[in-house]
Image: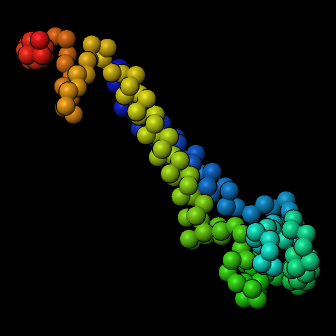
Amino acid sequence: MNTKPYVVLAAVVAAVVGLGGGWWAAQPHSHLSQHERLGAEIGCQCGTCPKRPIATCGCAFADGMLSELAALADDSQSDDEVIATLVSRYDPSVRIKPGSTGFGLLAWVTPMLFLTVGAVGVGALLMRWATMRDDEVIVSEDEASLVIATGDPEALAIVERELADLE
């Protein structure tokens, strides 16, 4: 049975699932209000919190940023305009979550791609181990390896000579 088509099919499926998962994670949650959505994506800039989202931080500085966010959201600005305003007032590190386009999308997709490649590699290695012949023997001496198939008389003669030399 030839297992190569199954490896290729598994690689394609894993890539589609991995890349699709990265794209899905980068999408904004549409069931949340703009204030809730951006409150979870903007980090506190007080200097004492470890860039915790302002929606969950609880410090006085985060409360001020939430009020500022609410005022910007009430002005009917888009998410990108609100974030651009906050980035200009603070600094680019105000964004906790990378964007869903350009380089930000790459930040979402790259880990999924590495996981996909790793999963396919492990699957291929496991398939290789599962299909190894039972009659292959690995003999190793002084960092040199010789794979001997039990039906190869020349290889067996080499091993018998080496064993005789050891005695």
In the picture as drawn, the residue positioned furthest to the bottom comes out as: 89
Quarter of the image for residue 64 reads bottom right
Which residue is nearer to you in this view: 124 or 151? Answer: 151
Q: Is residue 73 visible?
A: no
Image point (60%, 60%), residue name: 108
Which residue is nearer to you in this view: 46 or 129? Answer: 46
Residue 162 higher or lower than 103, as above or below: above
Image point (68%, 56%), residue name: 25
Residue 79 higher or lower than 107, as above or below: below
Q: Is residue 103 visible?
A: yes
Percent of width and height locating residue 48: 80, 74
Q: Is residue 97 left or right of residue 35?
A: left
Which residue is nearer to you in this view: 65 or 5? Answer: 65
Image point (34%, 25%), residue name: 2
Percent of width and height locating residue 85: 76, 86
Quarter of the image for residue 101 reads bottom right
Percent of width and height locating residue 37: 82, 67
In the picture as drawn, the residue positioned furthest to the front comes out as: 167
Image point (60%, 51%), residue name: 20
Q: Is residue 68 left or right of residue 132?
A: right
Percent of width and height locating residue 22: 61, 55
Quarter of the image for residue 139 reads top left
Q: Quadrant of the C terminus?
A: top left
Q: Quadrant of the N terminus?
A: top left
| Figure coloring | rainbow
